[in-house]
Image: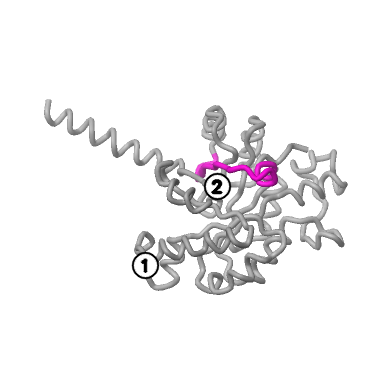
Amino acid sequence: MRKNRLRELLNAGKPTIGTHVITTSPEIIEVVGHSGLFDYIELSGQYATWSLPQLDNFARAVDLFPHMSSMMKVEPDPRLFITSRSLGAGIPNILFAECSTADEVRECTRMVRADTPEDKGFQGCVVRRISGFVLDIGNETWVRTLREAVVAIMVEKASLVEQMDEVLSIEGLDMIQFGPCDFSVNTGRVGKMSSPEIQRKQRDIIEMALKKGVHPRVEINYFEEAQEFIDMGVRHFCIGWDLFIIYQWCKKHGEGMRRLLGEA
């Protein structure tokens, strides 16, 4: 089975750089891969429009590049179905959105593991890409692959923030990320995700995770935004979204051309 690059880097204590895609275009995946600069690509499935065949093709495109692995962002419902299908497609790392309690996080960690007495997971034998369809059905290689899946959660519910000490002690949780947008919404601060209060909360969560030995990941738009978090000890970043990049390019160059033509 293919190595999980993200897991290898975490185990080695090295920094990681990812990027997001909301489209499932294999062409976009290949372009990112050809840059040679990203360790993984996150399919933000919570926002994307995707089909089951597209999950397979997304993973296939990532697999063209040995230096990269992939991640799926999974929405709350149907969480187990999406997790199973993502893992089965060959997407080896899962980011769970909108967990409300520590018990919910525990359940999420079990969703990526095999249904063995040791792992106590939810995943059963499958004839899918994860097992080479017919090669590694229900064997030790398959179990090990699931054990190596990186489990990450979004911290974006006020109720979960209140339980962070317990959450950060959960076995099998590798990475957390604070979600300022959803946190601002569900705490009655709509539109204030960039406020000093919300940004302070993000730093508090990061500091807690670092003390507990859980990897904090930060989403940024530009690499220049990373330094303040690097100074805190953060080593894991996911930078940029395909749709936002296209929009920003269109705005900048479209406005520039309109300006030039208006002045001609």
Q: Amino acid at mark 2?
A: Arg
Is 248 above or below relative to 262? below
Label pair 2/1, CB-CB below 8 angstroms:
no
| Circle on res. 235 | 2
On the image, the x and y values in percent for residue 165 come to: 61, 70
Q: Is residue 77 left or right of residue 180?
A: right
Q: Nearer the viewer, mark 2 or mark 1?
A: 2
Q: Amino acid at mark 1?
A: Val
Quarter occupied by the N terminus: top right
Identity of the residue drawn at 60% across and 72% down:
101
On the image, the x and y values in percent for residue 137 come to: 85, 45
The region drawn magenta spans 7-24
| Circle on res. 190 | 1
- The span from disc 2 to disc 1 (Cα, nearest Å) is 29 Å
Q: Nearer the viewer, residue 211 or 196?
A: 211
Other-residue count near label 2 (Cα within 10 Å), few / some / many at <14 / 14–19 / ≥20 = some
Look at the image and say whether residue 12 sits in the magenta stretch.
yes
Of pointers 2 and 1, the one earlier in the residue sequence: 1
Identity of the residue drawn at 45% across and 43% down:
240
Q: Is residue 260 left or right of residue 240?
A: left
